[in-house]
Image: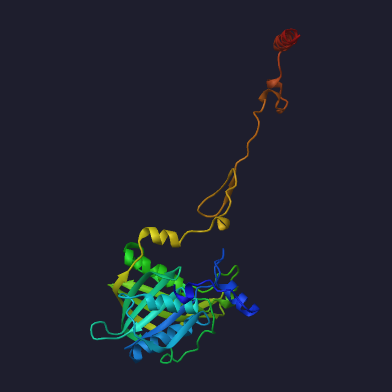
């Protein structure tokens, strides 16, 4: 049995709090990412990992030492680091003759690799090279995806899901306009993925709605898709399963349309339209002969009841 798989009983209150944080919850903690250098990572890959870590702060762990591992051949070391640092996302950087400037981005489910995609860096501009003001640490970014491939091709669809998981940050209930500062833009075109990051500037426009300008702040990456390791459909559905306690309870006779409008259905008893009060008009007045027949019908009904 592995040392990390054993049931550990806490001896101090601090250890108890630490273990409680890692216990399964209905609303899971924010997904942390680990950024790992391979055994032969060059300066470009190291710089990319450092810049991505700057975007991910404080929800990331940067491993400064080199780790000799190959994610597509053996995932045990990644799973070990995941348990150790409590991270469900990872980015692994390496460089060799066959696959130069290589990045592997992936995620884990229950401390086991769920899916990962290999990307090649063709062009890179770092945060330092773009001399503009940067966003503060921990800013929740806005993610924009452009290109039909993200909706058509299965590999690109999974890559989009992976990138959303990697960069989306914490889940928030309210958004402040001044807090929308960082924009991450991903474009899929001609077999390449273009990753750009911008700082959003709110300018005076003469009206209530401000004028928006985008200023590139870095990093800037031109990527190409290489190998993929995707989870099976059954495992992928299992990882996306929502606990019963979080599922909204279905309310009777209430429905919602695509725009979020609520519709309610009311059940009423059958109305007697003969007793309905209408406008008094001469044309609607009953004739004496009709009144006599009605009175006779009522009398006959009373006699039958008796």
Residue in the image at 57% along x and 80% along y: 204
Residue 71: quarter of image = bottom left
Q: Quadrant of the N terminus?
A: bottom left
Q: Quadrant of the C terminus?
A: top right
State the residue in front, 1 or 103. 1
Disc tally is 0
| Residue 53 visible in rendering | yes
State the residue in front, 53 or 196. 53
The spot of residue 202 in percent (x, y) is: 54, 79
Residue 300: quarter of image = top right
State the residue in front, 84 or 269. 84
The spot of residue 269 in percent (x, y) is: 66, 31
Q: Is residue 98 above or below residue 300?
A: below
The colour scheme used to paint the residues is: rainbow
Residue in the image at 43% along x and 77% along y: 80
Q: Is residue 147 above or below residue 69?
A: above
Residue in the image at 32% along x and 67% along y: 155
Which residue of the protein is positioned furthest toward the front in this rendering? 1
The spot of residue 34 in percent (x, y) is: 45, 80
The spot of residue 128 in percent (x, y) is: 43, 92
| Residue 125 visible in rendering | no
Residue 102: quarter of image = bottom left
Instruction: Say whether residue 142 is left or right of residue 231.
Output: right
């Amino acid at each position: 049995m592995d040392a990390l798989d054993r049931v550990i009983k806490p001896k101090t209150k601090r250890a108890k709090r630490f273990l409680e944080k890692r216990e399964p919850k209905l609303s899971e903690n924010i997904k942390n990412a680990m950024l790992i250098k391979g055994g032969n990572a060059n300066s470009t890959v190291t710089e990319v990992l450092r810049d991505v870590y700057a975007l991910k702060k404080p929800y990331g762990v940067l491993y400064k030492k080199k780790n000799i591992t190959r994610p597509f051949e053996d995932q045990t070391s990644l799973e070990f680091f995941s348990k150790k640092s409590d991270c469900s996302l990872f980015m692994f950087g390496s460089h060799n003759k066959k696959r130069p400037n290589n990045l592997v981005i992936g995620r884990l489910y229950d401390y086991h690799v769920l899916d990962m995609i290999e990307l090649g860096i063709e062009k890179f501009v770092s945060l330092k090279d773009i001399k503009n003001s940067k966003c503060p640490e921990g800013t929740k970014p806005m993610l924009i995806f452009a290109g039909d491939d993200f909706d058509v091709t299965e590999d690109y669809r999974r890559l989009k899901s992976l990138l959303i998981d990697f960069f989306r940050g914490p889940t928030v209930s309210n958004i402040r306009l001044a807090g929308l500062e960082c924009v991450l833009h991903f474009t899929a075109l001609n077999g390449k993925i273009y990753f750009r990051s911008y700082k959003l500037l709110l300018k005076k426009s003469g009206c209530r709605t401000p004028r928006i300008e985008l200023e590139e702040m870095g990093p800037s990456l031109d990527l190409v898709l290489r190998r993929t390791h995707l989870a099976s459909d059954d495992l992928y559905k299992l990882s996306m399963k929502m606990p019963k306690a979080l599922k909204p309870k279905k309310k009777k006779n209430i429905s919602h349309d695509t725009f979020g409008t609520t519709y309610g259905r009311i059940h009423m008893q059958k109305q007697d339209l003969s007793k309905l009060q209408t406008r008094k008009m001469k044309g609607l007045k009953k004739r004496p002969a009709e009144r006599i027949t009605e009175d006779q019908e009522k009398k006959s009904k009373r006699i039958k009841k008796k």
